[in-house]
Every structure is written in structure tokens, then in C-alpha cells.
Image: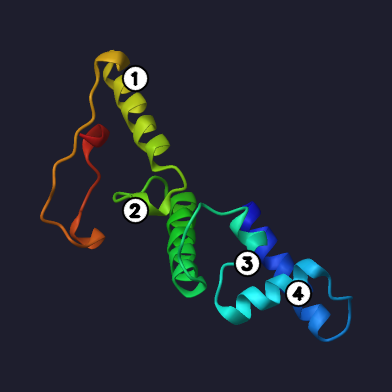
Amino acid sequence: NILNSVMMTSLIDLKRALVGEIGMSESLDLLGVSLYNGYLPSMWARKAPKTEKPLGSWMLHYQHRQRQFDAWMADGEPIVMWLAGLHIPESYLAALVQVTCRARNWSLDKSVMYTNVSVFTEASEIESPMAYGT
């Protein structure tokens, strides 16, 4: 993940610059100022989904997204998907429709996606995935 790499290398470089191992560049200075003031650093924001969140809220959101992606990679498609954690959730939803149409031999241009509101409030309440997202 590009964002993870940018965050890690920039924080390592900032730490090295603060102890004098490397020179403090303008970008590292801006990173330090942003972190100190609780703002999302611009070098990270360029690689992340657009947000208006302050740094603390953004980090919680980022960690939640990362856990979802890590679980997805380790365990396969999740039973419950946190759509707000996706960069472009519309793409995921379109892919669900396409996969379902392909599996059921339906015409894609005649398919419609709709949502039913459930009574579930926790992912742990869902025991198994829905068949074809239906």
C-alpha cells in the first residue's frame, strides 16, 4: 500500500531529522508541524481518500480500514463490508452486481441493486455471507 509506505518512510525520516542524522527538509518540517497541530500531513493526504477529519479521527479511520483490508487479504471476502472504509465504495458495489450477474447468468444491463435495512448493529451478529449478495 502506497499510503503505508509514505507514512512509514516519512515518520522514520522525521525521527532521523529530529536527532540530527539527516537534514530537516521543508517537507519533513511540514510533516512535524502538521503532526504537532493535529492536522493530516499533506504528504499523506495526497495518497489517502479525501477527508476533512482531524488527524486523531483520521488515524482511527485509517486503522479501521487497514484492519478490514488485512482481514480481507487473510480470510477472503468478509461477511460484512464497512463501505465507508473503501476509497471508492461504488466500485465495490458495481463489482458485486457484476459477479452476481455472471454467476447467475443474468443480463447486467437489466440488473438493479437495492438495499434493505436490517436490524443488525454488529458484524458479529451475521453468521454467514449472503448468497451472491442477495
What is the number of the mark on residue 86? none
Judging by the rendered image, the residue that carries numbered circle 4 is: 29
Coordinates of residue 61 in the picture (x, y in percent): 44, 64
The residue lying toward the viewer, choosing from 62 and 73, is 62
Circle nearer the N terminus (1, 4): 4
Whether the residues at callouts 1 and 4 have beta carbons within 8 Å, the answer is no
Q: Secondary structure at mark 3?
A: loop
Q: What is the three-letter code of the residue carrying label 4?
A: Asp
Q: What is the three-letter code of the residue carrying label 2?
A: Trp
Q: Nearer the viewer, mark 2 or mark 1?
A: 2
* Label 2, label 1: how far apart the Cα atoms are: 24 Å
The residue lying toward the viewer, choosing from 108 and 72, is 108
Q: How is the image coloured?
A: rainbow
Q: What is the three-letter code of the residue carrying label 1?
A: Arg
* Vertical comparison of 100 with 13: above or below: above
Judging by the rendered image, the residue that carries numbered circle 1 is: 102
What is the number of the mark on residue 82? 2
Judging by the rendered image, the residue that carries numbered circle 3 is: 41
